[in-house]
Image (cartoon, coloured by chain):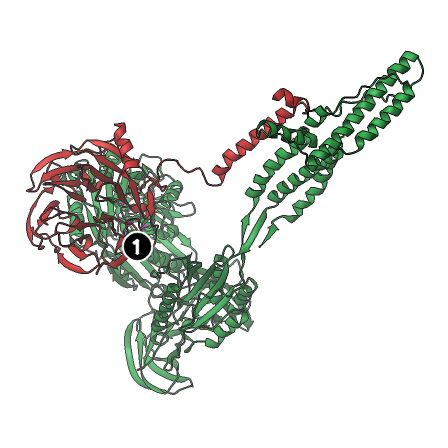
């Protein structure tokens, strides 16, 4: 226990302040010396107290509190059995906690998260935090743990891991922990995968010709000799299976012959099945090749009954067409590489996921794929593409910015998601999604059950505007438990009914507990032209879903029973888009040619009438060869990165394009439109090789010219699209004649696609080069055994670290305890106040000892009613002093009388009067019994001056003797 | 006295002393505010528990009842039934057999059988009623999911009359009603329907038996209480939507004392309202907030057998509060 100061330097202020106090005290010359010193002392004491309070004086004492953080390794390399063992160990340890202990949990993989802050609960709640499991970053977890330990207490970290770190270095973190006084214990999660077959590489030639045989080569290793089945899949379909034999400890190579019939990108996958293989995850491999042939186009049809006019045109133009419905749209960027262009024909944004839109954006921008959107009632803004990745790559905006009055749509969302896991997050996501799909002049409002206000508007029905403010409000939503929808539907009705919006819609989401109101309210909504859609998620029972479904039926809207939460945003985009029907114009018009374009080449005047279109706005740098009669874009194009995009806001079938389908230039128009945006063919002058090894991706490009000579001094750069759709810039350097190399970091397993340009110099347009490589499995599966030795090494770095086993007590209070400081300023101030009073008292109130004594005597006499007959020592001292003062008084009297004598005799006075004496002391003389007993001496006498003097001296000397 | 002192005190001292004393007085008066003192001098309810999963802690406690010996039973969203001592110390807890689909919302001590007291738990999301001994042993179970007359969807609350007949409030099948079961768990009859008219219900969340023969139903989404006799005949309808005394905002749970006074836990108004036996509002206490005495969407209210203490399941605040009737409620009644 000791007192320490937070800012000890502040105490130096005592010096000038103390000097000042001392100087001020000199002005108290009126006081006696002891009094002055007391006053000065009081003042200094007061200053010390105040300065200590300001300097943050703290009283520290020992702390018996112990905080333990469990670091739980959740990476993929930990087998399920070991994970069970770890959580059981934590649970058992928690049960042994005492009242001074607090325990927390951090889970980690590639990143780390605090699943439980240090607290005293002895129950282990299920782990809720989600971390990226494809890597092990133990150092990051330890750093997070050190940051979580706030306050003073004993601190321990317990690491439950297999010791196979592949990111960061835990040794540094352990040293930091030791410096901070944190003990590091380890509990190794031991395993040894005796039987592991690893498929190391899958190799295929980068470019092949159609119908020409080539080999797929597979390299595999195994920890022991075993039989296995090798299956090769080409574009997802198995092309062959062979039984193979793997030797232990060496590289086994196998080949499978195959060929490709179609042009474009092809994916090969190799799978090894071995009995008793403990980690099947590392038995897969991927490779890609490119087959040279006809251009390929993916046509996505959003219509229920797809029209064949457009595909027929393309096929006749020797363009291969693959037709799919929106739900079959590829989910992976390498699958898009097979296509040179993608056409969305009346496909709504709500029919595909945001991830798919991001993939398309990357494929167009970085890999050169072409993209075209053809109009219909589900396209452009009416399809909900507002503020989407697709809008970013299109030459038009999904909104009409024209001054002309546009009908508005109005949407109200009612949110009851409090009972689903992460209900707040999903509430935020879906309201944001709906907001995104609306245009700036549409109206939106959101209702929920808040606390304490109950049913309230998160934001009332209002023009969406530039959405920034509403986005901020949406982030604060905390949906509560709404008992039923009666009031919120009524509030929605009250807001929507008087609105002048042309389309009014309400969407309700619930888990089914909240009751639906009587049918009369929904009927009232219908009468006011307000439609109602319902979304039920995780209903407790079928009846809950039935109730919601009936409400949607009565409400003239859609019903969704959602099992997969990630579909929710799409549903809300779709529902929001229903109010954007106002963007659709159903009046016939004649197209207006505004500028020339390769698409219109050879097509004369006289484009036929179209029956309608979807309203959009041209972007600044876009080319708009055709406009509608109202000046809105009909045909717009532009370059997006290395790819090209085309927007056609009317349709290519017989709904709006009835006159076009029969037009003799129909084929020419569409063939030219599609060809314009196709990805340029893969240039045979470039040989691209991509590899992933040792956590890094490598690109090698060999460039030759038409004559076969090496092409040097090319400027080659591009983008790598990683598995999570993030583009990364990459540049290549020339390393030898015609050969250029570059690399890129590889974190997650998946496909890495390269899209780049090779140009003579930085300003020339370049040739397109593409390639791909795959990391088949995470580095988590490279080690077939746990690394107990590494963990022991970590424990040894810190002095108190231990290697734990099943029975080890975790909550050991053997660490040097840290003190827990209590601030002292309240006590110091409490002490300073009376000191201040005492200080003032000392200087201003003159109470002497005699006063105290006299006061005490007075108290005795009058309150205790005691007369003191005898005398105590203090009484005697009093008497002594009294006598002295009496003598002084008498001397004065005598001198005064001398003066009068002198004056009356006119001579000099032997005694000079120094001047008026300041009334230094007005002595209060209480009557004491002693005094009363003593006879008073008279000052005058008849003996003469000398005789009187002598007599006086005699008397004084007698009085000086103590009386008995 | 002053004149005595004046003879040896420096002039002006009194001013300084007065000033110093004033500052001292101010400091002592203000310091408690800064140091976190200054508690309300009104009677504080006793707070039991805080958020957590340990014994004695709660996560959204919803069902509460008090046995005749003062022990308290609580159902919360962790799937546990906890038994606490009369002063809130955890005695026992057990888990419902199944709660992945949702947890029970209400419970009731049944002492209609003089031989034994059991605990009835309304397992709302599993469409059934469970009866437990006070040691946590399941002794009876009845109720089945379905839309047939004798099947239920979401049973919410249960009341028991003197003969052991059970009355269960239920909703979600568009036939919100009170179902009547015999002590053996066999279905007998029902009354009520879905709607707004008197005699109909919208999500009834509370039901209580008032001896000798009345039932009061908290007709939650109609913001009112309805009084029936045991045969299901409607006797009275009390209340309307609002915040004023006599009005309700989602009344959820009911409790009745020996004088026939009714305590209503209002989820939407975050308060407890007390009515006399004629349905007239006589007291209101609570209000939204986290401080002692304030409530957050309370789902449950229960009285001790003597009617001297009120226990509230303060759901959103994850705790229970025990109010003293004499200190909290009586003064409000007296003011009327």
**Chain that is coloured green in the picture:** A
Q: Nearer the viewer, residue A609 or A570?
A: A570
Residue at the front extreme, as displayed: A964
Q: Name the dominant secondary structure of the magenta segment.
A: loop
Question: Residue A841 at what x, y percent from top left?
Answer: 65, 31
Image-quadrant location for residue A175: bottom right
Residue A285 at x, y percent in the picture: 37, 75
Task: Please name the residue that numbered disc 1 is placed on.
Answer: B90
From what the image shows, is residue A785 above or below residue A28? Answer: below
Q: Position of residue A390 (x, y in %)?
A: 35, 52
Tell me if I can see residue A148 in this picture: yes
Quadrant in the picture for the N terminus of chain A? bottom right
Q: Secondary structure at mark 1?
A: strand
Q: Is A838 on the left-hand or right-hand side of A395?
A: right
Residue density around tag 1, few if under 14, some if 14–19, many if 20 or more, within 10 Å: many
Residue visible at 63% across and 20% down?
B3
As for residue A832 lying within the magenta part, the answer is: no
Chain part drawn in magenta: A415-423
Please report the residue visible at 59 percent of the width from the left and 40 percent of the height from the top. Answer: A831
Count numbered badges in the picture: 1
Residue at the outermost right position: A907
Q: Give the chain letter for red.
A: B
Q: Position of residue A7 (x, y in %)?
A: 63, 48
Horizontally, residue B68 falls left or right of residue A162, namely: left
Subunit bearing disc 1: B
Quadrant occupied by the C terminus of chain A:
top right
Vertical position of residue B86 compared to residue A316: above or below: above
Compared across the picture, whether A810 is left or right of B275 comes to: right
Occupied quadrant, residue A929: top right
């Amino acid at each position: 226990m000791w007192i320490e100061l937070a800012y000890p330097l502040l105490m130096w202020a005592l010096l000038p302040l103390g000097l000042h106090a001392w100087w001020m005290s000199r002005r108290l010359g009126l006081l006696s010396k002891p009094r002055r010193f007391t006053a000065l002392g009081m003042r200094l004491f007061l200053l010390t107290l105040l300065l200590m309070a300001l300097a943050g004086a703290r009283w520290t004492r020992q702390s018996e509190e112990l905080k333990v953080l469990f670091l739980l390794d959740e990476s993929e390399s930990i087998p399920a059995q070991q994970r069970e063992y770890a959580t059981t160990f934590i649970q058992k340890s928690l049960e042994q906690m005492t009242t001074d202990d607090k325990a927390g949990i951090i889970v980690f993989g590639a990143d780390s998260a605090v699943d439980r802050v240090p607290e005293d609960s002895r129950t282990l709640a299920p782990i809720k935090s989600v971390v990226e499991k494809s890597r092990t970053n133990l150092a990051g977890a330890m750093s997070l743990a050190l940051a979580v330990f706030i306050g003073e207490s004993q601190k321990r970290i317990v690491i439950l891991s297999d010791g196979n770190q592949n990111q960061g270095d835990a040794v540094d973190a352990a040293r930091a922990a030791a410096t901070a006084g944190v003990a590091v214990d380890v509990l190794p999660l031991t395993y040894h995968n005796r039987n592991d077959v690893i498929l190391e590489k899958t190799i295929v030639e980068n470019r092949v010709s159609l119908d020409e045989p080539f080999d797929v080569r597979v390299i595999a290793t195994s920890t022991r000799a075993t039989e296995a089945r090798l299956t090769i899949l080409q574009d997802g379909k198995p092309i062959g299976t062979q039984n193979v034999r793997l030797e232990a400890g060496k590289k086994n190579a196998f080949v499978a012959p195959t060929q490709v019939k179609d042009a474009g990108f092809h994916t090969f996958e190799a799978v090894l099945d071995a009995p008793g293989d403990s980690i099947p995850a590392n038995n897969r491999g991927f490779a890609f090749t490119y087959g040279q042939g006809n251009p390929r186009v993916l046509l996505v049809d959003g219509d229920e009954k797809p029209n064949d006019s457009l595909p027929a045109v393309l096929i006749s133009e020797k363009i291969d067409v693959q037709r799919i419905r929106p739900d079959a749209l590829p989910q992976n960027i390498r699958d898009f590489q097979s296509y040179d262009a993608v056409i969305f024909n009346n496909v709504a944004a709500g029919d595909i996921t945001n991830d798919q839109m991001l993939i398309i954006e990357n494929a167009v921008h970085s890999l050169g794929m072409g993209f075209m959107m053809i109009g219909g009632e589900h396209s452009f803004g009416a399809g909900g593409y507002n503020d989407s990745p697709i809008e970013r790559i299109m030459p038009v905006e999904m909104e009409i910015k024209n001054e002309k009055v546009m009908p508005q749509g109005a949407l109200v969302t009612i949110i009851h998601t409090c009972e689903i896991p992460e209900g707040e997050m999903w509430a935020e996501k879906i309201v944001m999604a709906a907001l995104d799909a609306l245009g700036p002049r549409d109206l939106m409002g959101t209702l929920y059950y808040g606390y304490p206000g109950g049913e309230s508007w998160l934001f009332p029905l209002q023009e969406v505007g530039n959405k920034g403010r509403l986005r901020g409000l949406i982030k604060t939503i905390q949906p509560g438990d709404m008992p039923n929808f009666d009031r919120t539907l009524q509030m929605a009705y009250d807001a929507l009914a008087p609105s002048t919006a042309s389309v009014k819609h309400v969407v309700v989401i619930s888990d089914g507990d909240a009751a639906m109101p009587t049918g009369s309210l929904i009927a009232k909504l219908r009468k006011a032209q307000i439609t109602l859609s319902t979304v039920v998620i995780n209903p407790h029972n079928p009846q809950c879903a039935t109730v919601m479904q009936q409400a949607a039926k009565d409400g003239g809207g859609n019903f969704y029973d959602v099992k997969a939460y990630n579909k929710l945003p799409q549903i809300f985009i779709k529902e929001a888009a229903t109010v954007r029907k106002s963007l659709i114009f159903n009046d016939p018009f004649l197209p207006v040619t505004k500028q020339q374009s390769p698409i219109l080449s050879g097509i004369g005047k006289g484009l036929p009438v179209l029956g309608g279109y979807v309203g959009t706005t041209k972007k600044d740098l876009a080319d708009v060869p055709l406009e509608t009669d109202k000046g809105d874009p009909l045909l717009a194009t532009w370059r997006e990165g290395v790819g090209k995009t085309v927007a056609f806001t009317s349709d290519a079938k017989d709904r709006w394009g009835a006159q076009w389908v029969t037009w003799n230039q129909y084929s020419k128009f569409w063939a030219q439109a599609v060809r314009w945006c196709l990805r340029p063919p893969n240039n045979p002058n470039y040989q691209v090789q991509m590899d992933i090894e040792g956590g890094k991706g490598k690109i090698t490009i060999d460039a030759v010219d038409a004559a076969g000579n090496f092409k040097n001094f090319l400027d080659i750069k591009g983008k790598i699209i990683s598995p999570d759709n993030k583009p990364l810039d990459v540049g290549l350097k020339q390393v030898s004649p015609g050969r250029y190399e570059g690399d890129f970091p590889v974190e997650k397993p998946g496909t890495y696609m390269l899209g780049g340009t090779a140009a003579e110099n930085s300003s020339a347009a370049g040739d397109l080069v593409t390639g791909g490589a795959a990391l088949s499995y995470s580095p988590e599966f490279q080690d077939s055994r746990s690394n107990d030795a590494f963990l022991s090494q970590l424990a040894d770095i810190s002095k108190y670290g231990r290697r734990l086993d099943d029975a080890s007590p975790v909550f050991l209070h053997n660490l040097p305890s840290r003190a827990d400081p209590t601030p002292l300023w309240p006590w110091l101030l409490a002490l300073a106040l009376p000191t201040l009073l005492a200080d003032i008292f000392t200087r201003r109130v003159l109470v002497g000892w005699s006063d105290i004594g006299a006061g005490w005597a007075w108290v005795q006499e009058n309150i205790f009613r005691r007369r003191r007959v005898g005398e105590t020592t203090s009484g005697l001292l009093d008497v002594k002093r009294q006598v002295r003062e009496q003598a002084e008084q008498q001397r004065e009297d005598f001198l005064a009388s001398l003066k009068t004598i002198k004056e009356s005799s006119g001579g000099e006075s032997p005694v000079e009067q120094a001047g008026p004496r300041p009334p230094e002391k007005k002595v209060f003389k209480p009557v004491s019994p002693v005094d009363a007993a003593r006879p008073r001496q008279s000052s005058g006498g008849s003996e003469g001056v000398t005789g009187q003097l002598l007599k006086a001296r005699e008397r004084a000397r007698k009085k000086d003797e103590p009386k008995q | 006295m002053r004149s005595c002192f004046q003879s040896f005190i420096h002039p002006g001292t009194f001013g300084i002393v007065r000033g110093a004393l004033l500052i001292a007085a101010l400091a002592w008066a203000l310091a408690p505010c800064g140091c976190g003192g200054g508690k309300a001098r009104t009677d504080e309810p006793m707070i039991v528990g805080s958020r957590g999963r340990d014994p004695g802690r709660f996560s959204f406690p919803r069902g509460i009842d008090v046995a005749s010996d003062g022990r308290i039973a609580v159902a919360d969203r962790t799937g546990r039934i906890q038994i606490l001592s009369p002063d809130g110390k955890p005695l026992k807890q057990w888990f419902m057999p199944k709660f992945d689909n949702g947890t029970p919302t209400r419970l009731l001590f049944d002492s209609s059988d003089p031989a034994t007291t059991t605990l009835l738990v309304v397992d709302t999301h599993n469409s059934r009623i469970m009866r437990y001994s006070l040691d946590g042993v399941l002794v009876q179970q009845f109720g089945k999911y379905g839309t047939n007359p004798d099947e239920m969807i979401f049973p919410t609350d249960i009341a028991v009359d003197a003969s052991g007949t059970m009355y269960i409030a239920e909703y979600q099948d568009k036939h919100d009603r009170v179902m009547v079961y015999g002590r053996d768990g066999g279905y007998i009859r029902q009354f009520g329907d879905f709607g707004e008219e008197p005699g109909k219900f919208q999500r009834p969340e509370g039901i209580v038996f008032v001896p000798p023969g009345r039932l009061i139903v908290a007709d939650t989404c109609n913001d009112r209480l309805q009084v029936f006799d045991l045969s299901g005949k409607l006797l009275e309808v009390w209340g309307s939507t609002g915040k004023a005394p006599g009005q309700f905002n989602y009344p959820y749970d009911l409790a009745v004392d020996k004088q026939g006074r009714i305590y209503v836990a209002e989820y939407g108004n975050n308060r407890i309202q007390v009515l006399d036996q004629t349905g007239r509002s006589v007291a209101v206490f609570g209000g939204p907030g986290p401080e002692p005495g304030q409530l957050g969407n309370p789902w449950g209210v229960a009285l001790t057998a003597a009617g001297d203490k009120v226990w509230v399941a303060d759901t959103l605040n994850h705790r229970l509060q025990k109010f003293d009737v004499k200190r909290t409620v009586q003064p409000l009644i007296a003011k009327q």
